[in-house]
């Protein structure tokens, strides 16, 4: 019989760690105080390549113009920034009680061309972008986004944003889950941290569904053990409690021949798996308050494309309803756009560094999460087109590069009229 996989989580004591932050009126930035302000973990802003990187320098105001209609989850209430209607596409089932967000996913099957990556098989097909709906249902209703532990179920659903459909668009079943800390119950950090698995075998085959929500604990290694070390893994540790980040998978195998003892050696399998960022969208009342007080907020974090991590910085201007950001890593680009409800959407993607001869195309979209917009999660899908090579020796090199990635950034500080430390 086929050996079932088991999800085992290493549980550690919960620590609440918050970085020092500050705010200044009139958008003034005082370098003398940067050594006392953490950008990430124990890294001070002054140590964070400010001259080249930070949102404190070289961000440009967004170009004029409204965003093109795109699919964005988590929208509720009135539009704070636009009078024109916007086309909103939600994954089926992303309603009240669900955590709405974004995912990168891929399909694979037995017999397909696969190469080994860090922890998963990476098929020859690229990652695709999708909207993601997560339904966490604890048996104990006292378990909330940020506290409590116990059993329950998880259900996930992914809706494609591009031309590639997932082989399996949902978990297929309510998956038994442990919330708040996995096996052992050493933590009680609520719905954003969970481990879920369900498997079933029949005479004709077997199937399984799983999902995880990484711990936000600063000492936890759950995220880095899945995605590696980098800015995205650090962002998970500092995410708002109303954000879940993790993995999802559904796999179905069908026995094609063989006897009772050896039938599992001859089977066809189909699999959809990926990574997601989902959460509870920021209330419109809070966003309206930020707009009225002309708040400018700065976010730092990372992206993950299924193989490598990059760094992401985003600056948000609530009063005009605009934002701009920088992505570095496998792709170096900047994006800017507008805010609509609790969502951001790009209307421009371009080269990050001046003098680049390459052109960029694509989109970025995301959602403010948490009661006070503590995090922004989303997905980017960007293509870089290189200048045609002149040297005949490199004429056969690919002329384009495409990256699809989820991203997560957390608020570092905010400034503006009557701004208060976050």
Image (tube, rainbow, N blue to C red):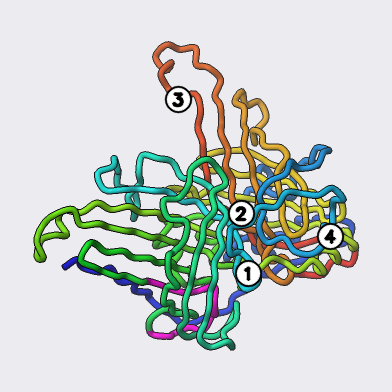
Label 4's element? Answer: loop
How much space separates mark 1 and mark 2, taking CA atoms?
A: 14 Å
Across and down, in percent, residue 354 comes to: 67, 30
Q: Nearer the viewer, mark 2 or mark 4?
A: 2
The answer to whether 101 appears left or right of 80 in the picture is left
The answer to whether 293 appears left or right of 258 in the picture is right
Q: Image quadrant of residue 298? A: bottom right
The answer to whether 66 appears left or right of 131 in the picture is right
- Precedes in sequence: disc 4 or disc 1: 1
Across and down, in percent, residue 59 comes to: 75, 43
The magenta stretch spans residue 188: yes
Label 1's element? Answer: loop
- Precedes in sequence: disc 4 or disc 3: 4
Does the residue at mark 2 contact the one at mark 3 (Cβ under 8 Å)?
no
Label 3's element? Answer: loop
The magenta stretch spans residue 192: yes
Q: Nearer the viewer, residue 69 or 222?
A: 69
How much space separates mark 4 and mark 1, taking CA atoms?
A: 19 Å
How much space separates mark 4 and mark 3, taking CA atoms?
A: 43 Å
Label 2's element? Answer: strand
Across and down, in percent, residue 272 comes to: 40, 54
Q: Nearer the viewer, mark 4 or mark 3?
A: 3
Crowd band around label 2 with a 10 angstrom C-alpha radius: few (<14), some (14–19), many (20+) = many
Residue corresponding to mark 4 = 295
Does the residue at mark 4 contact the one at mark 1 (Cβ under 8 Å)?
no
- Precedes in sequence: disc 1 or disc 2: 1
Residue corresponding to mark 2 = 378
Mark number for residue 397? none
How much space separates mark 2 and mark 4, taking CA atoms?
A: 21 Å
Q: Which of 11 and 108 is in front in this view?
A: 108
From which residue to which does the magenta span run? Answer: 184-197
Mark number for residue 240? 1
């Amino acid at each position: 019989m086929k050996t079932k996989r088991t999800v085992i989580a290493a549980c550690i004591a919960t620590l609440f760690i918050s970085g020092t932050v500050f705010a200044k009126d009139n958008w003034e930035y005082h370098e003398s105080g940067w050594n006392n302000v953490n950008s990430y973990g124990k890294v001070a802003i002054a140590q964070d390549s400010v001259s080249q990187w930070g949102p404190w320098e070289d961000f440009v105001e967004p170009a004029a113009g409204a965003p093109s209609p795109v699919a964005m989850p988590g929208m509720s209430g009135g539009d704070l920034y636009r009078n024109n209607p916007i086309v909103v596409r939600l994954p089926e089932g992303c309603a009240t009680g669900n955590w709405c967000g974004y995912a990168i996913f891929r399909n694979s099957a037995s017999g397909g061309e696969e190469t080994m990556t860090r922890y998963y098989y990476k098929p020859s097909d690229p990652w695709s972008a999708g909207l993601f709906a997560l339904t966490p249902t604890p048996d104990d209703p006292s378990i909330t986004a940020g506290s409590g532990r116990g059993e329950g179920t998880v259900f996930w659903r992914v809706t494609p944003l591009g031309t590639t459909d997932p082989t399996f668009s949902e978990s297929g079943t309510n998956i038994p889950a442990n919330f708040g800390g996995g096996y052992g119950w050493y933590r009680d950090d609520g719905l954003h941290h969970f481990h879920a698995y369900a498997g079933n075998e029949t005479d004709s085959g077997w199937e399984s569904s799983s999902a995880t929500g990484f711990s936000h604990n600063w000492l936890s290694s759950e995220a880095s053990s899945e995605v590696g070390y980098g800015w995205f893994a650090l962002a998970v540790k500092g995410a708002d409690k109303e954000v879940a980040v993790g993995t999802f998978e559904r796999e179905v195998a069908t026995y094609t021949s063989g006897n009772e003892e050896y039938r599992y050696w001859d089977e066809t399998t189909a699999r959809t798996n990926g990574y997601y960022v989902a959460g509870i969208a920021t209330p419109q009342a809070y966003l309206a308050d930020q707009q009225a007080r002309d708040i400018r907020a700065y976010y730092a974090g990372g992206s993950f494309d299924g193989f490598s991590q990059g760094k992401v910085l985003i600056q948000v201007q609530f009063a005009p309803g605009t934002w701009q950001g920088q992505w570095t890593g496998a792709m170096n680009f900047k994006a800017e756009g507008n805010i609509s409800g609790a969502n951001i959407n790009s209307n421009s993607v371009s080269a990050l560094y001046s003098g680049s001869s390459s052109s960029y195309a694509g989109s970025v979209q995301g959602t403010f999460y948490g009661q006070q917009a503590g995090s922004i999660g989303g997905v980017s899908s960007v293509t870089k087109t290189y200048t045609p090579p002149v040297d005949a020796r490199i004429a056969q090199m690919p002329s384009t590069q495409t990256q699809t990635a989820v991203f997560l950034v957390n608020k570092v500080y905010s400034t503006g009229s009557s701004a208060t430390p976050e």
